[in-house]
Image (spheres, grey):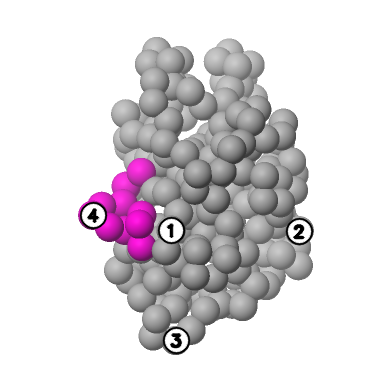
Amino acid sequence: MRGAEVSALVILDLHNHSIKSDDGRAKVENYCQWISKKGIGVDGFVLTEHRQFDAESDYRPLEDEFGILILKGSEVETDYGHVLVFGVNDEMQTAFDFTRIGLSAELVVREVKRCGGIAVPCHPGRTQVGMLAHVRERGAVDGVEVIETLNGGSRGSENDDAQSLAEEFSYRGIGGSDAHIVSHIGRCSTRFDQDIEDMDGLVEALRTSRYEAVRVSS
């Protein structure tokens, strides 16, 4: 959706990691403080911890203190690269093992949808951990509707390659910072033309085409 005119009601950074992830070095409170201090133009962010769903952490006090939406998803590892999972619930966590490396991407996409969520391959332009090279070798994954076309940690032509993949297969595109340290939050986000108050609302919004990947500046 590059170049689309979208009324900016809500801007969410859909891909980030805290110290709950094995390679994350940022506390969620510090993300909130950074966004507030730097005046970064996001209304909220999603924590997509590696190979897990953090069901126990309660970030509502931070939401109230900083006036920012904090949602939780996951990033799982498949045979087609890494995939963001939004709308995680108990049924989904019994459908496949979030901790397993090399999950079937087709299974993940199918089961996430069956359980009411949405699966989004992330940083697809990267080698090995992105889906582009796998698609070229083995073909597309059935059921994919959305991919991450703008990733704050991607380098060189990786984001351009992701955008080209989206255009080739008519995938919708989202943006996320893929932050692992505090100063990287808010680099890339997704701009929606509708209000989003919780994960259910995010999943429903992602099923539409009423959003675009954007770079956000303070």
From the image, give the main secondary structure of the stretch colored magenta. Answer: loop
In the picture shown, does residue 1 fall above or below 93? above
Front disc: 4 or 3: 4
* Region rendered in magenta: 152-161
Q: Which residue is mark 1?
A: 163
Q: Amino acid at mark 3?
A: Arg
Q: Is residue 202 magenta?
A: no
In the picture shown, does residue 109 fall above or below 18? below
Q: Which residue is mark 3?
A: 138
Of mark 2 and mark 3, the one earlier in the sequence is 2
Q: Which residue is mark 4?
A: 156
Q: Is residue 115 shown left or right of residue 189? A: right
At 60% across and 17% down in the image, what residue appears? 67
**Residue at disc 2, secondary structure:** loop
At 34% across and 30% down in the image, what residue appears? 182
Of mark 1 and mark 3, the one earlier in the sequence is 3
The reply to whether residue 47 is visible in this rendering is: no
Which of the numbered marks, if any, corresponds to residue 116?
Answer: 2
* Residue neighbourhood size for the residue with mark 4, other residues' Cα within 10 Å, grouped as few (<14), some (14–19), many (≥20): few
- Across and down, in percent, residue 17 comes to 43, 42
